[in-house]
Amino acid sequence: MTVRGRLRDVTLSIPRGVTAILGANGSGKTTLLKLAARLLKPDRGSVEGPRRVGAALQNPYLGFLGPTVAEDLARTAGGRGEALKLLREAGLEYASERSPYTLSMGEARILSVLMAISWGPEAVVIDEPTSGLDGSGKRWLASLIARLGVPVLVAGHDIDFAAAVAGWAVILRDGRVRVSGDMERVLRMLPEETGLGLEPGPAVKAALERGLDPLCTARCVLGVTR
């Protein structure tokens, strides 16, 4: 499929589970997520797969409408009671009566993800999942992704987080798929593939230099289990 000026002749099959979409700025990651979420139509080709897709996009504030955090989440969660339950589990209950536009980027990211998953979608896409999140926020998100039980696409630059949560990876460059395959295999080729515009994260880099499993190392450093 092709999106003029953004993606060119992309043919891609995404397996079940968690897939990381990686690439430099402008490589086409966000466009690919929008196609998967049915928020964008290709100029040529088609998208097959789930039609009920929850989306947490790059700017979380654009998805907020309600006067308070709780009311905004209640729109997708099916009521205020369920919304408060989700906020409590995410450690965000303290902000339930605040305007969503007063949230920090990390808090807004968490709310955006909760809104994306709370209505029972068949698949979920998350753009720049760790933007604004501290270590505890990343651990919460990794644990949540592992429990969803539906196909998940995460797109971003955080290679260590991707290694901790995803079993499959796709690398885009200049709107084309350059690499697609098992996450560990993709990670092991990164140091030699300088033309992809990606650098291994600190945890993955240290694991590769020491001959360790990069996936296990990334999960251990993040403090998550799968």
Image: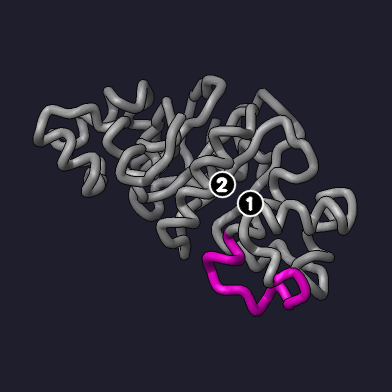
Q: Do the residues labelled 1 and 2 touch (CB within 8 Å)?
A: yes
Q: In this view, does 95 lie to the left or right of 65?
A: left
Please name whichever residue, 18 or 79, is drawn nearer the observer in this view of the structure. 79
Where does the N terminus fall, quadrant-wise? top right
The image quarter in which residue 145 lies: top right
Query: Number of marks in the image?
Result: 2
Q: In this view, does 174 lie to the left or right of 61?
A: left
* Residue at 70 percent of width and 48 percent of height: 116
Give percent across and percent down for residue 151.
Answer: 60, 28
Question: Visible in this render: residue 174?
Answer: no
Residue on which disc 2 sits: 126
Q: Distance between the residues labelled 1 and 2?
A: 7 Å
Mark 2, residues whose alpha carbon is within 10 Å: few (<14), some, or many (≥20)? many
Q: Which of marks 1 and 2 is in front?
A: 1
Residue 219, placed above or below residue 108? above
Q: In this view, does 205 lie to the left or right of 74?
A: left
Q: What residue type is labelled 2?
A: Ile
Q: In this view, does 163 lie to the left or right of 8?
A: left
Tell me which secondary structure the magenta stretch mostly adopts: helix
Q: Earlier in the sequence, mark 1 or mark 2?
A: 1
Please name whichever residue, 96 or 111, is drawn nearer the observer in this view of the structure. 96
Residue on which disc 1 sits: 113
Q: Which amino acid does label 1 sit on?
A: Val
Q: What is the magenta range?
A: 95-109
Give percent across and percent down for residue 204.
Answer: 23, 40
Under circle 1, the secondary element is helix
